[in-house]
Amino acid sequence: MEVVIVPDAKAGGELIAEAMAQLLRRKPDALLGVATGSTPLPIYQALTAKVRAGEVDASRARIAQLDEYVGLPTGHPESYRATVLREVVEPLGLDADAFMGPDGSAEDVQAACEAYDRALSEAGGVDLQLLGIGTDGHIGFNEPCSSIASRTRIKTLTEQTIADNARFFDGDLSQVPRHVITQGIGTILEARHLVLLATGEGKADAVAATVEGPVASVVPASALQLHPHATVVVDEGAASKLKLTQYFRHTFANKPEWQGL
Ligand code: PGA
């Protein structure tokens, strides 16, 4: 696992957006797996700026969603489909048909999950998957103790995640859906490059357990240790509980070519 410590969220966003731009220059129709939440927004802003400045052509990019709430009315502004369309697809100037995601309003949720896993494979697999991390160590909505081999499926959110996400629902815990569809950890591990961004001290414990702890389903993000090409980008706050900080800084200093990955 490669750990890169950046001064702040903006720098993390810029670094990852440049990695995405370089991927798109090599593979213009790359399938980009995107995450929701507050953390990745600087990435999308930086990538959009590069597109608008003519530094990269994203017109053939394809976008895949990581997870989705179950049961929100179609078009609800906090559904992840609506969020990805608003934050990623529209700013990049892509058509809605460049975008794929699980159907959170399907009557048969299990069938929708299986269909999404199939669709990802048929699309050739995700080239670069962006990930955030929950304060409880989740990736996607794979909450603690999710199987490391899991596929896309329905999950129940923990109280912690419901509390963390209430800010998107006017702070009203009762409005946060209890169920979600998420790419499984096994599904996520099939992407060719995993890039996790974590910012702020609130993520420091989860980051330390992910990077320096054992691989364990109780910390779902620790499964990144199993991936041959996983990059963790953290700001000073999120890095504050790492013990091997000097080594990670050293890694970054000596791997400028990372930006070409
Ligand atoms: P956040 O969410 O970026 O809003 O903190 C991250 C996550 O829950 O994966």
Image (cartoon, helix red, strand yellow):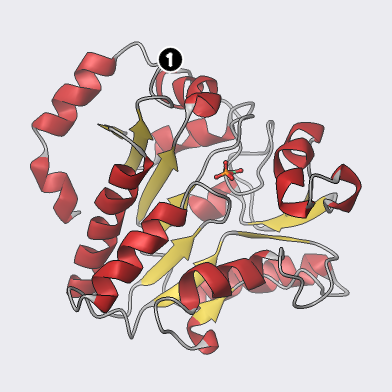
In the rendered image, the residue lying farthest to the top is 243
> Where is residue 115, by image quadrant?
bottom right
Residue 229 shows up from this direction:
no
Mark 1 surroundings: few (<14), some (14-19) or many (≥20) residues within 10 A? some
Figure check: 213 above or below 134: above
In the rendered image, the residue lying farthest to the right is 174
Q: Ligand 1 shows up in which quadrant of the image?
A: top right
Residue at left offset 24%, top offset 66%: 21
Q: Is residue 93 left or right of residue 248?
A: right
Q: Is mark 1 within 8 Å of ligand 1?
A: no
Residue at left offset 64%, top offset 71%: 81
Residue at left offset 44%, top offset 35%: 199
Residue 244 shows up from this direction:
yes
> Where is residue 145, by image quadrant?
top right
Q: Amino acid at mark 1?
A: Lys
Q: Is residue 225 left or right of residue 36?
A: left
Position in image of residue 174 (x %, y %)? 91, 47
Q: Is residue 233 left or right of residue 142?
A: left
Q: Quadrant of the C terminus?
A: bottom left
The mark total stands at 1
Q: Tell which of 23 and 109 is nearer to you.
A: 23
Figure check: 155 above or below 122: above
Position in image of residue 197 (x %, y %)? 41, 42
Position in image of residue 91 (x %, y %)? 43, 76
Secondary structure under tag 1 reads: loop
> Where is residue 171, by image quadrant?
top right
Position in image of residue 239 (x %, y %)? 38, 23
Residue corresponding to mark 1: 241
Q: Quadrant of the N terminus?
A: top left
